[in-house]
Amino acid sequence: LRCPCCWMTTSWACLTKGQVLRAFAMNAGGALFGIYSIVMAPYFVGSGLMGRWIWRRPNEWVVLFVGAT
C-alpha cells in the first residue's frame, strides 16, 4: 500500500526487501535514514544490553540532527 504523502514508509519497506535503488527512488532521505538505522541498530542494542556504550557515546549534535530529519 503506497504512502499518500512523503513515501518514507514505502522507502523503508523497499529497504526491508533489499530493493535499495527503489527505496532511494521513493524517498532518498527515508532511504538514508533507514540505512543508518540498519547499520547502527547492532551498536545500540549491544550497548543497551551491556549497560554502557561499546565504543563511545554518540555526539549530541549528531543525535539532534538525525532526530530532527
Image: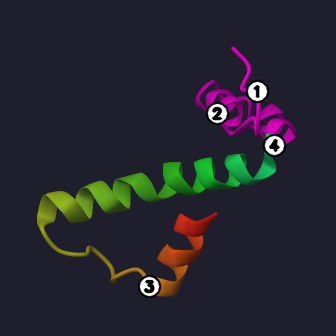
Determine the residue positioned at 33% across, 82% down: 57
Q: Name the residue under label 1.
A: 4
Determine the residue positioned at 63% across, 36% down: 12
Q: How far apart are marks 3 and 1 (CA)?
A: 33 Å
Q: Distance between the residues labelled 3 and 4?
A: 27 Å
Q: Which sits earlier in the primary sequence, circle 2 or circle 1? A: 1
Q: Which amino acid does label 3 sit on?
A: Glu
Q: Mark 2 points at which residue?
A: 9
Magenta stretch, main secondary structure, is helix
Q: Which sits earlier in the primary sequence, circle 3 or circle 2? A: 2
Q: Quadrant of residue 7?
A: top right
Q: Nearer the viewer, residue 12 or 56?
A: 12
| Badge 1 element | loop
| Badge 2 element | helix
Q: How far apart are marks 2 and 1 (CA)?
A: 10 Å
Q: Which mark is residue 60?
A: 3
Q: How far apart are marks 2 and 4 (CA)?
A: 12 Å
